[in-house]
């Protein structure tokens, strides 16, 4: 829709109209900005949510329109002046990542307009209404983020003059930076003004929101400290949920906000807020930096006499930190029998810690917390997985069973991995004989439904996608003693490589390294105050990240997996490199035999991904077409494995760059396996090939700056280099990627091949994928090798796709010979290049994914998913250049005459389209792409980043006012990985414990000495 800008009209027009159908006014501002809806209105204008139609991505923006409904000439003049000044201020301040950027200042039809960045998210007043009052930890986090913004504004001689919860927005999505999600943005500089030392004492106009305004601002004399006063009122409002006017006792001339606290706050924070709220400006904080200093420092020792008991406790706490650190380190590097759950004290449930360098490992498990704040391990009782494979498509049902052993209702949250390309299309909750079916909704809508049901005492479930392969399930209001089952169903396509079909079910996700957020590996430059650290209980968070189950130790739950294979043809060589399996044939009268594979009862610890491989009979060209038709159109899946030979003399010489991960997560078996793999790679190179090696952790090192000839001397040099590599530091994959991308191009007639060897356990996947998409030179290829029992298959798969290569996963305990042989068969034998897909038939061409098929290697399939919306029949023709320059052609007839067929085909097409759209947003979200993903996901009932499943019981099942718990199952360490992701991280914990123990002991000694002297 298109809203008319005419203040006297505001007619809602159709989206493509250029002139208002009611008054004839232009609907495009400056021929590019179209108003969609009014989102704000006042005496001096309106604010529109709009779209910039000039840019291809059509991003959202905000348009402020100035016009006056006030007749007072002086007021109009002042408002006009403020509107013009806001444009100047925003142009300067909008360069800050947490202040909206100004796009344009325009005049059209005698009205002024400001066009600025649209900030999608909730303001803090809305957040307070939906999530409740802020904890002290959350207020500290808020101040630590807001004060630097305020310092930046004041440094440009600008006073905001209207700081309040409504003008502070928490970002939901950011067009500028994916990492800016959940950050705060200070908006609405319409009341702000420039100032100078001489202007600070002058009386001006009263501007601001009455409830948050400083006393001197009432008199028209706003100063920098006025913003500090308003920020303090914002804090006490967020802490209490009570209107600011009710927090001040005018009869006593004092603030009484402590009387309305839902939970107490520390003396330190109270004193800081009190000083921010001083009526006399000379007694108030003068700068944001002063507040940050006090917020993030120890309490002064001048009150040591009164605080002696607390300091004694602090000293004991510091020594305890050191003691616990030693216990944790001992537990990491030793193996022990199954232990009882670790009990961890932490802050209130609503606190939201910032991300440290190493994210907490994501794993299948249930979390619960008591009202007192105690977190305990609550084991997932059992998991059943049933997979039915027909052809090359699997339909999988996952049933996870939990029991609430407590006397109070349980609210549970657990995370678990699934294949990154799976089409998750169903969720339900089973409680006794009841089944609560899940509905697919927009993610934010699903959250609102869930939260509303939770408050009403109904049993509710919410399934969300955090990453392409990580999901979160929330369960509200589970009654005491109840056993519940969560059922999730998905469709996935089997991988085919080197003659083997491969079925994978992920069971654990290793800890992720997030580059660039902070540096826990380095010792702090100044004393650290526990209350000032970025998480609610910093040391607890550090320790909890390392509290993983040693390999082979049970976490308290087992898993059963049953896979039924109906390939349509005889199968052979069924193996699992990951697990011990039992195989049997199931024959039914008149039906082809089905092969059933189950886990051996002695191998049911879910600490490694299940990998199952098998082969089908015949080596001739294999091609299949599966189709399905319904009211959304005709869907099809084409699989082609051409049987083509490649002559040795036609093999193109290669410049091979081996990119090897030597970060801390590779410690132990993964690095040992990587070294074996590298030695086999070097031995398998062709005589005309050249090579070099780049190893990366915190930084990248190279064997040589130029490719080396494949000679015996250079081979020995490379093998010696590999043998001496050690694992330590963070997984700074971007350093390695940038190093190889900056290499000089390969010479004419040579093919640059990048071979990446890593576990992929990082958090900045999109940044890496985007870099390859943009900077990998034409003709170059990237091949990814995952080493370990639970690697990041999402990253490895996407890198191979955008890098026009292939992907392989090698377990740490698997023979590498077969994998290396397959790899060299692939890179030496590209059997089809320049692949094109054309439609020969009636109607429009089908919508096919991937949009541009990559070159095809030996024993690798071409997989295409398509939708013919008009369901008209025709032929799909695939043409390409085969080995030796010969033309290749294959035709597939497609018919959609009647409804029916395998519904999984439609789901896989929907998932393929979502995947393509998400690959186009690795640099950041685009509104039209987000909308497209959402529409496909809703239309095909699929999980995505923007959709979620929600299920709600019809009736109230628990007392809404009763307390709930949140528990944490002990983590499974991926099989073969040592107990920590990065060794430097453990040293950070050790140094932290040593430092805290020493610091508290020094304070205790000083306190004792002062006490004796007094």
Image (cartoon, grey):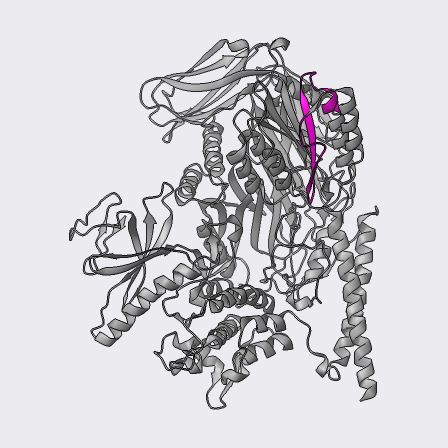
In the rendered image of this protein, does residue 600 appear above or below residue 138? above
**Residue 655 position (above or below residue 68):** above
Kindly indicate the quadrant of the structure image that contains residue 628. top left
What residue range appears in magenta? Answer: 680-707
| Residue 265 x %, y % | 61, 74
- Give the farthest residue toward the left: 23
Is residue 726 in view?
yes
Left or right: residue 60 versus residue 142 is: left
Q: In terms of depth relative to the viewer, which is nearer, 597 or 279?
A: 279
678 or 422, which lies in front? Answer: 678
Q: Is residue 500 visible?
A: no
Residue shown at the point (53%, 29%) measured from the top left: 777
> Considering only vertical position in the picture, is 371 above or below 779?
below
Residue 683 lies in the magenta-colored region: yes
Total label count? 0
| Image x and y of residue 95, in percent | 45, 57
Hey, which quadrant is residue 92 in on the image?
bottom left
The answer to which quarter of the image holds residue 733 is top right
Answer left or right for 924 relative to 102.
right
Q: Residue furthest bottom?
A: 251
Residue at 53% across / 42% down in the picture? 427
**Residue 672 pos. (x, y %):** 78, 34
Q: Position of 524 compared to 566: left or right?
A: right
Is 588 magenta? The answer is no
Q: Quadrant of the C terminus?
A: bottom right
Residue 88: image x %, image y %?
36, 63
């Amino acid at each position: 829709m298109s809203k008319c800008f005419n203040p006297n009209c505001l007619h809602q027009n159709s989206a493509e109209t250029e002139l208002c159908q009611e008054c004839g006014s232009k609907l495009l501002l400056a021929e590019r900005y179209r108003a969609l809806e009014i989102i704000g209105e006042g005496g001096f204008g309106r604010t529109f949510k709009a779209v910039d139609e000039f840019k291809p991505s059509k991003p959202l923006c905000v348009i402020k329109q100035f016009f006056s409904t006030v007749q007072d000439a002086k007021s109009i003049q002042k408002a006009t002046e403020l509107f013009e000044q806001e444009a100047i201020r925003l142009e300067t301040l909008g360069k800050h990542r947490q202040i909206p950027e100004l796009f344009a200042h325009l005049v059209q039809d005698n009205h002024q307009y400001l066009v600025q960045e649209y900030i999608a998210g909730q303001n803090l007043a809305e957040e307070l209404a939906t999530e409740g009052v802020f904890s002290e930890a959350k207020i500290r986090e808020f101040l630590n983020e807001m004060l630097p913004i305020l310092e930046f504004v004041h440094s440009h001689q600008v006073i905001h003059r209207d700081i309040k919860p409504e003008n502070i927005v928490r970002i939901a999505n950011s067009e500028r930076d994916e990492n800016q999600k959940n950050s705060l943005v200070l908006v609405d500089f319409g009341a702000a003004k420039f100032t100078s030392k001489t202007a600070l004492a002058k009386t001006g106009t009263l501007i601001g929101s009455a409830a948050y305004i400083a006393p001197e601002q009432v008199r028209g004399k706003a100063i920098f400290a006025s913003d500090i006063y308003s920020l303090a009122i914002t804090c006490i409002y967020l802490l209490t949920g009570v209107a600011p006017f009710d927090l001040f006792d005018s009869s006593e001339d004092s603030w009484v906000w402590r009387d309305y606290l839902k939970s107490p706050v520390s003396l330190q924070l109270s004193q800081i807020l009190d000083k921010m709220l001083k009526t006399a400006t000379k007694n108030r904080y003068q700068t944001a930096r002063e507040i940050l200093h006090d917020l993030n420092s120890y309490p002064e020792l001048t009150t040591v006499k009164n605080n002696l008991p607390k300091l004694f406790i602090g000293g004991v706490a510091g020594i305890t930190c050191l003691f616990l650190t030693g216990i944790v380190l001992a537990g990491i590097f030793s193996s022990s029998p199954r232990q009882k759950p670790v009990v961890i004290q932490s802050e209130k449930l609503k606190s939201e810690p910032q991300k440290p360098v190493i994210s907490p490992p994501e794993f299948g498990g249930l979390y619960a917390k008591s009202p007192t704040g105690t977190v305990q391990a609550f084991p997932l009782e059992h998991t059943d997985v049933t997979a039915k494979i027909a052809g090359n498509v699997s339909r999988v049902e996952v049933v996870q069973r939990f029991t609430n052993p407590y006397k109070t209702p349980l609210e549970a949250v657990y995370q678990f991995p699934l294949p990154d390309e799976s089409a998750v299309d169903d969720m339900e909750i089973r409680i006794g004989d009841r089944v609560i079916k899940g509905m697919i909704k927009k993610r934010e809508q699903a959250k609102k439904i869930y939260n509303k049901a939770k408050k009403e005492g109904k049993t509710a479930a919410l399934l969300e996608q955090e990453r392409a392969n990580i999901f979160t399930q929330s369960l509200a209001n589970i009654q005491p003693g109840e056993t519940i089952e969560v059922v999730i169903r998905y469709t996935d396509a089997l991988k085919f490589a080197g003659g083997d079909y491969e079925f994978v079910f992920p069971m654990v996700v290793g800890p992720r390294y997030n580059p660039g957020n902070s540096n826990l590996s380095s010792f702090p430059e100044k004393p650290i105050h526990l209350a000032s650290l970025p998480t609610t209980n910093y040391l607890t968070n550090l320790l909890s990240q390392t509290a993983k189950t040693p390999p082979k130790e049970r976490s308290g739950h087992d898993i059963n997996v049953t896979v039924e294979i109906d390939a349509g043809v005889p199968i052979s060589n069924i193996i699992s490199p990951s697990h011990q399996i039992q195989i049997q044939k199931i024959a039914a009268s008149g039906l082809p035999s089905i092969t059933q594979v189950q886990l051996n009862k002695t191998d049911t610890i879910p600490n490694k991904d299940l990998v199952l491989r098998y082969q089908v009979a015949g080596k001739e060209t294999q091609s299949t077409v599966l189709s399905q038709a319904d009211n959304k159109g005709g869907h099809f899946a084409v699989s082609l494995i051409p049987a083509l030979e490649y002559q040795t003399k036609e093999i193109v010489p290669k410049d091979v760059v081996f990119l090897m991960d030597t970060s801390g997560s590779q410690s132990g078996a993964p690095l040992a396996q990587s070294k074996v793999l590298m030695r086999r790679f070097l031995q398998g190179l062709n005589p005309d090939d050249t090579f070099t090696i780049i190893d990366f952790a915190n930084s990248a090192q190279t064997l040589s700056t130029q490719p080396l000839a494949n000679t015996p001397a250079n081979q020995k040099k490379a093998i010696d280099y590999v043998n001496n590599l050690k694992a330590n530091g963070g997984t700074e994959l971007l350093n390695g990627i940038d190093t190889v991308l900056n290499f000089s191009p390969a010479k004419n007639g040579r093919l640059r091949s990048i071979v990446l060897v890593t576990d992929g356990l990082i958090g900045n996947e999109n940044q890496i994928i985007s870099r390859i998409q943009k900077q990998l030179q034409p003709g170059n290829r990237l091949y990814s090798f995952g080493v370990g029992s639970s690697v990041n298959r999402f990253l490895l798969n996407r890198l191979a796709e955008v890098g026009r290569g292939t992907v392989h996963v090698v377990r740490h305990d698997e023979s590498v010979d077969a994998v290396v042989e397959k790899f060299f068969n692939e890179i030496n034998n590209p059997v089809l290049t320049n692949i094109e897909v054309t439609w020969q038939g009636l109607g429009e061409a089908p919508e096919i994914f991937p949009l541009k098929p990559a070159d095809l290697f030996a024993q690798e399939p071409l997989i295409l998913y398509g939708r013919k919306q008009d369901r008209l029949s025709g032929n799909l023709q695939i043409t390409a250049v085969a080995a030796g320059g010969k033309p290749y052609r294959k035709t597939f007839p497609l018919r959609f005459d009647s409804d029916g067929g395998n519904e999984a085909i439609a789901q896989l097409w929907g998932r393929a389209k979502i995947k393509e759209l998400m690959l186009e947003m690795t640099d950041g979200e685009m509104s039209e792409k987000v909308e497209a993903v959402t529409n496909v996901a809703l239309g095909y009932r699929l999980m995505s980043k923007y959709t979620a499943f929600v299920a709600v019981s019809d009736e109230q099942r628990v007392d809404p006012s009763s307390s709930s718990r949140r528990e944490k199952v002990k983590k499974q360490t991926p099989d073969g990985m040592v107990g920590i992701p990065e060794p430097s991280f453990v040293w950070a914990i050790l140094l932290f414990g040593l430092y805290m123990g020493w610091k508290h002991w020094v304070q205790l000694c000083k306190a004792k000495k002062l006490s004796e002297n007094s």
